[in-house]
Amino acid sequence: MNYDAAITQLNRNKAAFVSLMFNLPPAEYNWRRTPDTWNLLEIVCHLRDEEVEDFRPRTRICLESPGTLPPPIAPDKWPEQRAYLSQNYLTTMANFLDERSASITWLQSLEAPDWDRGFDHPEMGHLTAGLLLRNWVMHDYLHLQKAQNIRMAYLRAHSPDGFKYATGE
């Protein structure tokens, strides 16, 4: 993978998140398909926290302090520990977008980074900066897909006359 293209894609993904998830009504960003699935508020909180505590700092550690094990994280526990459901959606979205901008600025400032530098993770094995960058892009795609699916399900749940015209169903 071309690393410059991956950085460009992270920036494009920022615009995609804005287009898909910015300035929604509370009824939509708080809605969930089932009691055990995330809503859009939880996704935005997760994206912000991953930006700040996972992808950017771990990529930085790979590049600047290879061999150093980063502090542990527990994203699966964050929703409850950090009370995601009580956070302000618009503020959290703005924070995520600001953090993504900081990530892009940092990534674009790198001069001839060695994307093969990394550290040995006790469970995941050897992780390199390049691997983390590619996974950062994939993480975006996964959450863009989840957000799109939630938006579609919300529309279906709140439209009594169906979507046969659009979907053929």
Image (cartoon, helix red, strand yellow):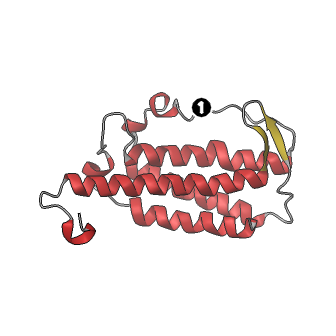
Residue drawn at (29%, 53%) of the image: 153
From this view, report whether residue 55 is shown above or below residue 114. Answer: above
Q: Residues within 10 Å of mark 1 (few under 14, many from 20)?
A: few
Q: Amino acid at mark 1?
A: Ala
Residue drawn at (39%, 53%) of the image: 90
The residue that mark 1 highlights is 74
Q: Look at the numbered disc 1 and give the secondary structure of its residue.
A: loop
The quadrant in which the N terminus is found is: bottom right
Foreground residue among 145 and 117: 145
The x, y position of residue 11, in whole percent, is 60, 66
The x, y position of residue 111, in whole percent, is 84, 66
125 left or right of 67 in image? left
The quadrant in which the C terminus is found is: bottom left
Residue drawn at (55%, 55%) of the image: 140
109 left or right of 144 in image? right
The x, y position of residue 133, in whole percent, is 70, 55
Please identify the quarter of the rendering in which residue 156 is found: bottom left
Looking at this rendering, what residue extends furthest in the left direction? 161
Please identify the quarter of the rendering in which residue 155 is found: bottom left
162 left or right of 74 in image? left
35 left or right of 65 in image? left
The x, y position of residue 100, in whole percent, is 59, 58
Residue drawn at (59%, 45%) of the image: 50
Q: How many numbered callouts?
A: 1
Foreground residue among 15 and 126: 126
